[in-house]
Amino acid sequence: MDQPHQPPRFPRGLDAIAYGGDYAPEQWPEDVWADDVRLMRAAGVNLVSVGIFSWAMLEPVEGQYTFEWLDRNLELLHRNGIRVDLATPTAAPPPWLSHRYPETRLVDRHGHVLGQGARQSFCPSAPQYARAAAGITEQLGRRYGDHPAVALWHVHNEYAGLNAHCYCQTCAEAFRAWLRARHGDLATLNAAWGTTFWSQRYGDWAEIEPPHAAPAPVNPAQQLDFLRFCSDNHLENYRRERDILRGLSPDVPITTNFMIANCKAVDYWKWAGEVDVVANDHYLQAERDDPHVELAMCADLTRSLAGGAPWLLMEHSTSAVNWQPRNIAKRRGELARNSLAHVARGADGVMFFQWRASRYGAEKFHSAMLPHGGTGTRIWREVAELGQRLAGLDRLRGTRVKADAAIVWDWESWWALELEWRPSVDLTYRERVEAYYTALWKAHLTVDFVHPEADLSRYPLVVAPSLYLTTAAGAKNLDAYVTGGGTLLVSYFSGVVDANDTVHPGAHPGALRDLLGVTVEEYLPLRRDQRVTLSDGTVADVWAEDLAADAAEVVLTYADGPAAGQPATTRKAHGRGTAWYVSTRPDPAGLRRLLAPVLAEAGLAGSPDLPDTVEVVRRPPYTIAINHGDRAAEVGGVTVEAGTVEVIEEA
């Protein structure tokens, strides 16, 4: 049987690390374009994203197209050897769409119809939007599908970034259709949602609405299904455009840009297999004490979505953004460190928003490769220096990162955990994940992220920092991993509910009770600012438990507080492996102490002689060392000066 045609897995015709950014020629007079291209070449730019927000310029009136300016721009880029990541402009419909079809406007949870004048101001279920988006996509595919400059198709932009959820009647109808496909009949839905609670039993599909604002929390199972529907709805919009382009331009890979750091609304595990190249946008959370650690975490998660394959950093910033509460500028050297940290963790491309700083609009204060001040600026000099450096790192292209351990990550568990009326408002998903990730980062261990039902067998250590929603399949997978010889660490409030937010039968931690060998008689959330001490002196907060170590060894106990004298952390031998449980939130120093015997048992040593300000990642046969500190450090016999990055060839 003939194998289906497979497009390339990276921008077509690009034989170097991708370098460039979002380019909006439509915002500038054409006499500026030649200067743009000259400076791109001077900076080492080889790939630019074009057309992302150009729908109104390409189709100013419904059905009337003006592609001539784009023809000229692509030809100019092609003549100068700059490849194009050509976008479908469907993230920002032109004003005629909402004016002619007011039913395409977004409706919020309170029933308010939102206005236009921003991007993503459309209902993702609206058939009029779908028809218009398919139309402009088809026109672009027919006109540019075999254009020699086009290296990559960029579908839409940041799906669900601003219109994640819509509560209009069109979405209500689409939600009901999705529910029919998921549950089959109302009896099954009523059982899954537990509608005997609060007299919610449904007798007709038409009675079901999206979870609008209500006097008390809407049924959590209904909310959870609505979140699944919304993620799937956006995915269908992506697939529609992708399939049009695939038919017209089969040799050009297709992607869309994920938002790993900011987009809770999309289950990217479902999306990752739908793109030819995994691409991500990441913007530094500059007010944090350790923004480079959060960057590393998001890069590791992106690589994990790519299955370990090289991926593309589609957007980040040269300096300050414009949409955070305080837009902190990057200082000298930070641009290169941030960019190369993504490369260290598997990116084979470094792209920015944006090429030339906009003079108007909502993002005019966002940094750019070419700032308002032009080529006399420090940022421009660092952009050009980075281009030169990346050109010398082609040897990294195609190599794969070697991970030491894995962290379980599940969007559905994140959604379920952060619904209303949980035992404590201090229970948040990313906080626990980031705490354990940071401890492993500071131990100089590289992490893959895994779905709870994925193959875990290659990892000596798996950490589940927050797995409130645990399916039977996920619990069985974790059990098999430990039975087969793995080391598992589980943090509190995990294993509690199933896929419908229904509590697993029996004592907590429900689905993980037998694996961990513990039972929780009662959760003991702590008061604001309350602290407890463990038997080794570790200080903890937020959470404690009335815990019984039924079939597990007690490692640490509570020295004071509501659980004084009871187990705080446990260890259970299970099959050929071990399962550890942590029932509280230790402070960072205490968490690192707690992890020490776990890492030792898993055979993970890290690099204890290195300061924890030095980031070390392996892309064999190379090691990349990034010094975030203010003193030089030795890595593999090479001196890494403060604030610099070294690529070291392994012996």
Image (cartoon, rainbow, N blue to C red):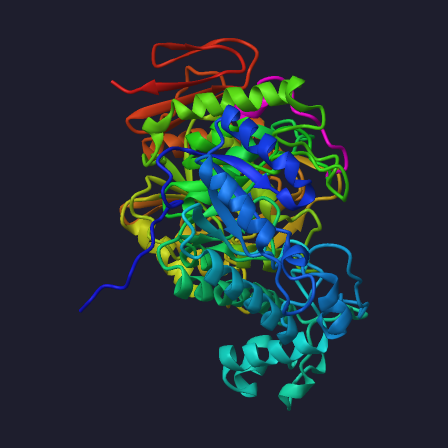
Q: What residue lies at 69% left-to-right and 43% top-to-bottom?
A: 27
Q: What residue lies at 36% left-to-right and 35% top-to-bottom?
A: 404
Q: What residue lies at 44% left-to-right and 48% top-to-bottom?
A: 150
Q: Nearer the viewer, residue 213 or 371?
A: 371
Q: Nearer the viewer, residue 79 or 36?
A: 79
Image quarter of the C terminus: top left
Image quarter of the N terminus: bottom left
Q: Nearer the viewer, residue 252 or 64?
A: 64
Q: Quadrant of residue 522?
A: bottom right
Query: Is most of the magenta stretch helix, strand or loop?
Result: loop
Image: 608 above or below 580: above
Q: Nearer the viewer, residue 485 or 438?
A: 438
Q: Position of residue 537 (x, y in %)?
A: 58, 27
Q: Quadrant of residue 162?
A: bottom right
Image: 343 above or below 543: above
Q: Is residue 327 left or right of residue 487?
A: right
Magenta stretch? 324-337
Q: Position of residue 62 (x, y in %)?
A: 67, 69
Q: Position of residue 41 (x, y in %)?
A: 50, 28
Q: Position of residue 379 (x, y in %)?
A: 63, 22
Q: Is residue 321 left or right of residue 648?
A: right
Q: Quadrant of residue 348?
A: top left
330 within the magenta span:
yes
Q: What residue lies at 65% left-to-right and 82% top-to-bottom?
A: 196
Image: 134 above or below 306: below
Q: Is residue 370 visible?
A: yes
384 within the magenta span:
no
Q: Is residue 568 visible?
A: no
Give the residue furthest to the bottom: 203
Give the residue furthest to the left: 1
